[in-house]
Amino acid sequence: MTDEKCDKGVHAELANTVIDAAARLDDLRLRAPGHGAVVSFQGTVRPVTKQGEPLEKLILDHHPRMTLVSLQRIAEAGIRRFDVSAVSVVHRCGAMVPGEVIVFVGVTGDHRREAFLAADYLMDRLKTEAVFWKRELGPFGERWIEPTDRDRMDLERWNEKNAGH
């Protein structure tokens, strides 16, 4: 894959406001028309913590330049690794309430398998490598969130030995 493919097919964005996933999907289709596969994923803020406690807010602190560069690098890696034509990564920052979209990932390509794999790969990298500092707030107070062992295992699937299995 060439760098030209990355320049034309990669969109990475840090969003301070609500993500309109339908509009992002339409934008992706317009940027990469004529492909047989369009795959998207929306991650939303859950109403409860992993411990089962009610969640009032999720806060993603960030460094504007470092965080955006991390999103861009992850998106570029996805388009280079898979036979896809366009990748869109839009990630929220700041305070969010349950139900809000925290991340949108979209991929277009000629074949569904590669598009699904690319979207899965992008999400595994975003969960563990995007530069964010995450906090959750609720009746329990406030606490920091780190990637889980499962997040790290999901990412490990993509090493050369395992290649997505």
Image: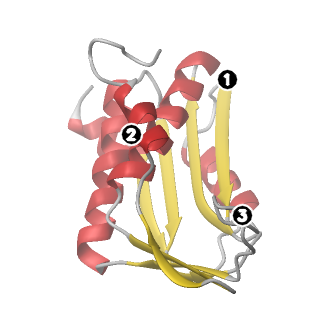
Residue where numbered disc 2 is placed: 152
Specify which label sits upstream in the sequence, 2 or 3: 3
Image: 76 above or below 121: below
Residue type for callout 3: Arg
Residue denoted by label 3: 46
Determine the secondary structure under disc 2: helix
Q: Looking at the image, can residue 52 be seen?
A: yes
Q: Residues within 10 Å of mark 3 (few under 14, many from 20)?
A: some
Judged by depth in the image, the label closer to the viewer, 2 or 1, is 2
Asked if 96 appears above or below 67 in the picture, the reply is: below
* Of residues 116 and 141, the one drawn nearer to the viewer in this rendering: 141
Quarter of the view holding residue 116: top right
Residue 36: give its label.
1
- The span from disc 2 to disc 1 (Cα, nearest Å) is 32 Å
> Element under label 3?
loop
The type of residue carrying mark 2 is Arg
Instruction: Quote the CA–CA distance across marks 1 and 3.
Output: 32 Å
Give residue 40's position: percent from left, percent from top.
66, 42
Q: Which residue corresponds to the image point at 50% horizontal and 64% vertical from the top-left? A: 91
